[in-house]
Amino acid sequence: MYLSKSDYLMGLDCVKALWLKKNRKEIMPEYDEATLATFDIGNRVQDLARDFYPGGIMVEAETWDVENGSILTKELSKKHNVLLEAFAQLSNGCFCRIDILVKNDDAWDLIEIKSASSVKDYYIDDLAFQKYVFENAGYPVKRCKVLHLNSDYVRYGALDVKQLFAEDDVTDAVLQKKSEVEMYVKGMLSYQAMPDEPEIPLHSSCSDCPFYGYCGKDVPPYSIFNLLRADKADAFYNSTHSCDIKDLPLEYCTTDKQLIDRDCFLNDKIHVEKENIKEWLNSLEYPLYYLDYETVMPAIPLFDNTSPYSQVPFQFSLHIQKTPGGELEHIEFLHQERSDPRRALAEALVKGCGKKGSVVVYNQQFEKTRNKELAALFPDLSADILAINERVVDQLIPFRNRYLYSPKQNSSASIKYVLPAFSDLSYKGMNIANGGDAMNKYLAFLNGSQSEEESKQMFADLLKYCGQDTYAMVLLMDVLYKWADIK
């Protein structure tokens, strides 16, 4: 049975997940749109990064054709100093494909391309496994490097690939992993060939695993993993094998929020602190401007004055309400061209928000930070944009602070949970149902990978989604007035 680099990394996280991948392929879920979007970003970054080592020769073999790829790599390595997508395979079943293989005197350097803007811990494990495979396949390895996006790069004009990427030498860190790689490889090859599924207890990070739907099928929608800090939830589950809050002793809840959440769940009641809600409502100044942004974060900067993963706002929705419970005016902006949206958005924002009245957002750090960035970018609009920030009021506060809490929130103050807990409106069934969807689909439009018809539908979906975000805040404002007994 084979062991790839991705298998190895999965096994480091959980040998049960590795076993399931090898022995229960039918329960492996298909990749969702968000994961596919991540793969697309990685492929685009990889294509550009190869220019960092010009003259590289591609090993032309399909990803699954490891045997042929390994033979081709061996042949090409005798004639060329830079190979792209190079293969190596061992008789014990281990194999990998390094992004760039570079000749260094009588040895080779392994270069792994990553679309992140810094070196992450698991990149070291990634390269440690590849070093193990390549060295045992007859390629002495001298240096191990990570070629990643450079967060300090700011685009002006054409992309500068040499500045877009940064290269970190991680050889020393990889060398420290040598003995454990050999040990883990031996264990994983043995584990994945076992006839019976390994028994590994659930823990809080399991929800990120592709097999969580299988391993966590008995976890209720609201459990200790929602209520408790990860370490405490794991300790309780390991000692009791229960994730049911009904089995959780009171002493495990050490914060006021946890006590409120537990009490509301067990007694199926809503918690309300009227005086705190009233105090928050009294801080509002009408007219109210309910504001929400959508942003895109291109890994490869598309516009001048942006860096890798800069937040670029391309859309906003603004519901305006002159009196409590009064009629609504709706203003919306959506940039529908493949150009920098920020100037047009900033001008529309300043015009729409007026000069007086509270600007209501949900999680103020996000909107206020985007506004500061826009103000820095456009000095002539700076005073007006920063004045908007001075008027911002955060609707997250009364829900995060538990002035009002429903057990339907599952210990979350996210608007995606709060809204359906207190109204009949939700995001279920929407073509774009969260900020990640909005970001990925708009990025596909900017990259030119949508048809005209797909873009037309996406624009309609974006307007509906962003508009619902601000309308949701209107509904939640009505909810706060209701529970505070303010007519």
Image (tube, helix red, strand yellow):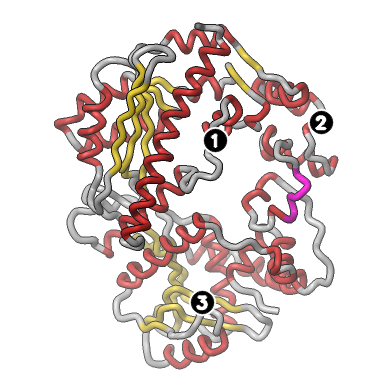
Closest to the camera, between mark 2 and mark 1, is: 1
Which of the labelled discs sits on residue 246, or is there none?
Answer: 2
- Which residue is under mark 1? 426
- Gap between marks 3 and 1 measured at Cα: 44 Å
Numbered disc in front, either 2 or 3: 2
Circle 3 sits on which residue?
Answer: 97
Q: Amino acid at mark 3?
A: Arg
Q: Earlier in the sequence, mark 2 or mark 1?
A: 2
Relative placement, left or right, of 139 versus 364 is: right
Residue type at the position of mark 1: Ser
Task: Please name the residue shown 58% across and 25% down the image.
Answer: 422
Q: Position of residue 326 (x, y in %)?
A: 39, 15
Question: What is the distance, in whole Å, between disc 2 and disc 1 at their CAs?
Answer: 28 Å
Q: Secondary structure at mark 3?
A: strand
The part of the image, by quadrant, that contains residue 246 is: top right
Q: Residues within 10 Å of mark 1 (few under 14, many from 20)?
A: some
- Of tags 3 and 1, the one toward the viewer is 1
Image location (x, y in percent) of residue 74 = 48, 90
- What type of secondary structure mainly makes up the magenta span? loop
- Residue at the image position 51 percent from the left and 64 percent from the top: 172
Which x, y percent locates residue 389? 31, 24
Give yes or no for residue 163 being in the magenta stretch. Answer: no
Q: Are marks 2 and 3 in contact (CB under 8 Å)?
A: no
From the viewer's side, name the closer residue of 239 and 246. 246
The quadrant of the image that shows the N terminus is bottom right
Magenta region: 214-219
Distance CA(mark 2)–CA(mark 3)? 49 Å
Label 3 Cα crowd, 10 Å radius (few <14 / some 14-19 / many 20+)? many
Q: Residue at x 41, y 67 (%)?
A: 43
